[in-house]
Amino acid sequence: MSKRLKPYRQVAEENIINGLFSADTQTLDQGVLVSISASDGSKDPVEYVDSSQLGKTDYAHIGADMYPVVPNKFTTAASGARAADVLGITLFEVAYTDENGEKYLYYKQKRIENQICLSGEAVPVASRGVFEITSGNYAGTPTHETYAIVGDDGKPEAVTYVGLTGMGLTMENVIGKFLSTPQSGSKQDNSVLLKLNI
């Protein structure tokens, strides 16, 4: 898993969805465009389930093998999805273990420092803001004149208006616009600025 977002961002707190949705997979990159896959208002905000994250769970104590999860889920947005079907962009990565195979479950401080959520935990998702997308995590050729749509693997894709209509899409599929061409030069890494507006 990886970080698709660089530290630079402009996002207001009211445009971040906190505590409501978790990923429907055990691992997910930071900076992925996502859509709601399950949402049931009649469920409790947190449910307790069996989980392999806990390791050995066949203890005699009641509840020793139960793990808290947020039941409402999101999934990676489909390529070409309408903006109305996109929840936003993930601000944290979802992971079980660190680079050494150690479980994040037992290293809360490291999770916080690395912007990691455990599988089943609520992941913050931003619906608006300006984000710097790392090289290789966007598609197309961004410029300040290109729109952004959902591309493959939840990556923002740069398209012109002509390209948009040529793909059989409309402005309903636009999730924002790019604000720059890729940064280039010996000290740059081809990252781009995306203004997300869902």
Image (cartoon, helix red, strand yellow):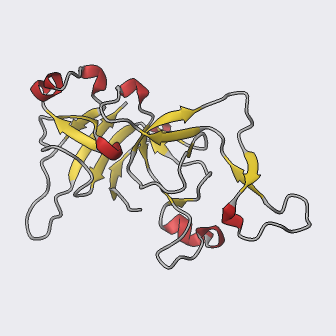
- In the displayed orientation, state which residue is furthest to the left: 185
Pinpoint residue 162: horizontal percent, then vertical percent: 10, 25
In the image: residue 59, left or right of residue 106: right
Which residue is situated farthest in the front direction here?
58
Look at the image and tell me in which quarter the N terminus lies. bottom left
Does residue 13 appear in the picture of this structure?
Answer: no
Residue at image point 21% right, 46% down: 139
Q: Is residue 140 visible?
A: yes
On the image, the x and y values in percent for residue 101 come to 53, 76
Q: List x then y, in percent, for residue 160.
A: 12, 31
Residue at 44% over, 51% down: 91
Above or below — where is 128 with respect to 137? above
User: Depth check: 22 or 20 in front?
Assistant: 22
Number of numbered discs on residues: 0
Q: Residue at x 47, y 66 (%)?
A: 114
Q: Quadrant of residue 46?
A: top right
Give x and y (percent) for residue 158.
Answer: 18, 39
**Residue at 91% over, 65% down:** 61
Q: Is residue 38 above or below residue 170?
A: below
